[in-house]
Image (spheres, helix red, strand yellow):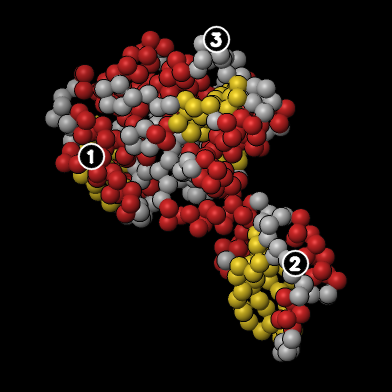
């Protein structure tokens, strides 16, 4: 990948969409005492940067190949939508393989972008089964597989994000820190490759979800590794294995330059940006901003920071879960199992222990653990995390038996 090739790809891209904005965000700049610039890839035609790599792949393939060949991809998210958009633009036919479990909203959006030029095939319950079916189909029809990140033309296309940033920053301004999400590594490979000649390596911070740290673990091992388990909450970046080509481009970085952020912390960012800025982010799109809050304030104070907002394809049916996770992470909501005496007035005595800002969000009688006692699941919300310390003190003083299960993943998943 050369800067000249990336610049040419960026210019070619203007035939399907204008550059995405680079915005100085006043709210975040005040919060972190820095100049925080957001590269708004959530404002592309498909609400993510994935259209860039897909466009560049198709552009190059069609320069050297037969337009009658069928293009194929496997994806249940942003890659599928970028692929479909570009198929329609170039008026070539493609097949999108998606797992049977893909939400209907994503299927409908992919079909809308591709129109008559794509077919959608639902295969398998998980992505691996879907991907295997796509690979078999490509061989059967002698088609063209369009990978989501592990390909030179995809990386080159994603690097156009960096080319635009260089043009959009005020003259004479260079970022002290560039923060970017990492899933398969296509975006990070392109950004660091394009800007690597003018920025020191320590100017890059890559961010992964805590439940899918494929780059961090690969850097530790010195080679790409496949994670045994992945938390799929951050679906746009929950990748079990970073691409081989992408790892080769990123292996020069230290594992200290890769931050893994908790999924629930990402939810706090999503809620804050929605409530304060009116910006809708998908979990992967909030990774970079979540990392800012986790850094030492001195690392940001007075600096020029560019954060990549990678996508905004958020299904609002997930909003209650995101809000729940955000409140738990912020310490504003907790769940307890109470051992409550089975006698008249016991519930009233318990309610009298609550403070003026404490609210019962859930109350469920579980079972009698003994003839004179019963187990109750209770969820409590409050306005200040410090209120829980006072509340637990009153629980102890009253001799109330309780267990905090807020952070007990097994119990929380079974009961809550």
Instruction: Report x, y in % for residue 284.
Output: 49, 40
In front here: 270 or 79? 270
Left-right relation of 14 to 128: left
Left-right relation of 308 to 379: left
Q: Which mark is residue 114?
A: 1
Q: Circle 1 sits in a helix, a strand or a loop, which is it?
A: helix
* Image point (83%, 75%), residue name: 399
Q: Nearer the viewer, mark 2 or mark 1?
A: 2
In front here: 177 or 244? 177
Left-right relation of 228 to 120: right
Can you identify the residue that label 2 sits on?
Answer: 355
108 versus 250 height, above or below: below
Report the quarter where the N terminus lies.
top left
Crowding at label 2, few (<14), some or many (≥20) Cα neighbours within 10 Å?
A: some
264 versus 394 height, above or below: above
Crowding at label 3, few (<14), some or many (≥20) Cα neighbours within 10 Å?
A: few
* Image point (45%, 15%), residue name: 167
Q: Circle 3 sits in a helix, a strand or a loop, which is it?
A: loop
Q: Circle 2 sits in a helix, a strand or a loop, which is it?
A: loop
Q: Is residue 143 visible?
A: no
- The quarter holding residue 155 reads top left
- The quarter holding residue 125 reads bottom left
Name the N-terminal-most of marks 3 and 2: 3
Report the quarter where the C terminus lies.
bottom right
> In whole angstroms, how far apart are the C-alphas of marks 3 and 1?
41 Å
Instruction: Report x, y in % for residue 193.
Output: 48, 18
Confirm or deny contact between disc 2 and disc 1 (CB under 8 A). Answer: no
> In whole angstroms, how far apart are the C-alphas of marks 3 and 2?
55 Å
* Image point (67%, 28%), residue name: 33
Can you identify the residue that label 3 sits on?
Answer: 172
């Amino acid at each position: 990948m050369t800067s000249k090739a990336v610049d040419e790809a960026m210019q070619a891209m203007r035939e399907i969409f204008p550059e995405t904005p680079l915005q100085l965000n006043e709210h975040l700049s005040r919060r972190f005492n820095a100049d925080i610039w957001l590269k708004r890839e959530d404002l592309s035609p498909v609400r993510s940067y994935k259209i860039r790599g897909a466009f560049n792949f198709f552009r190059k393939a069609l320069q050297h190949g037969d337009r009658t060949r069928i293009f194929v991809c496997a994806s249940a998210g942003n890659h599928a939508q970028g692929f479909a958009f570009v198929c329609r633009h170039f008026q070539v036919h493609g097949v999108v393989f998606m797992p049977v479990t893909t939400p209907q909203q994503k299927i409908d959006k992919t079909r809308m972008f591709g129109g008559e030029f794509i077919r959608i095939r639902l295969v398998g319950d998980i992505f691996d089964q879907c991907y295997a079916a796509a690979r078999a189909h490509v061989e059967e029809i002698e088609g063209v597989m369009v990978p989501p990140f592990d390909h030179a033309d995809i990386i080159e296309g994603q690097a156009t994000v960096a080319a635009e940033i260089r043009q959009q920053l005020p003259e004479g301004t260079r970022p002290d820190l560039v923060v970017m999400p990492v899933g398969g590594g296509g975006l990070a490979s392109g950004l660091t490759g394009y800007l690597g000649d003018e920025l020191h390596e320590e100017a890059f911070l890559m961010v992964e979800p805590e439940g899918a740290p494929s780059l961090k673990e690969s850097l530790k091992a010195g080679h790409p590794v496949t994670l045994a388990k992945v938390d799929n909450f951050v679906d746009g970046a929950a990748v079990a294995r970073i691409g081989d080509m992408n790892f080769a481009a990123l292996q020069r970085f230290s594992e200290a330059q890769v931050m893994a952020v908790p999924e629930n912390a990402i939810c706090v960012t999503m809620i804050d940006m929605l409530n304060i800025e009116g910006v809708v982010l998908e979990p992967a799109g909030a990774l970079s901003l979540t990392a800012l809050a986790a850094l030492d304030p001195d690392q940001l104070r007075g600096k020029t920071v560019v954060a990549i907002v990678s996508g905004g394809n958020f299904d609002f049916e997930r909003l209650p879960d995101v809000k729940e996770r955000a409140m738990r992470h912020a310490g504003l909501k907790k769940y307890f199992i109470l051992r409550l005496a089975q006698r008249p007035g016991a519930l009233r005595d318990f309610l009298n222990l609550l403070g003026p800002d404490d609210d019962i969000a859930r109350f469920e009688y579980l079972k009698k653990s003994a003839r004179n006692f019963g187990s109750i699941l209770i969820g409590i919300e409050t306005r200040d995390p410090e209120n829980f310390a006072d509340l637990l003190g009153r629980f102890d003083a009253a001799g109330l038996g309780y267990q905090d299960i807020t952070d007990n993943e097994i119990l929380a998943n079974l009961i809550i």
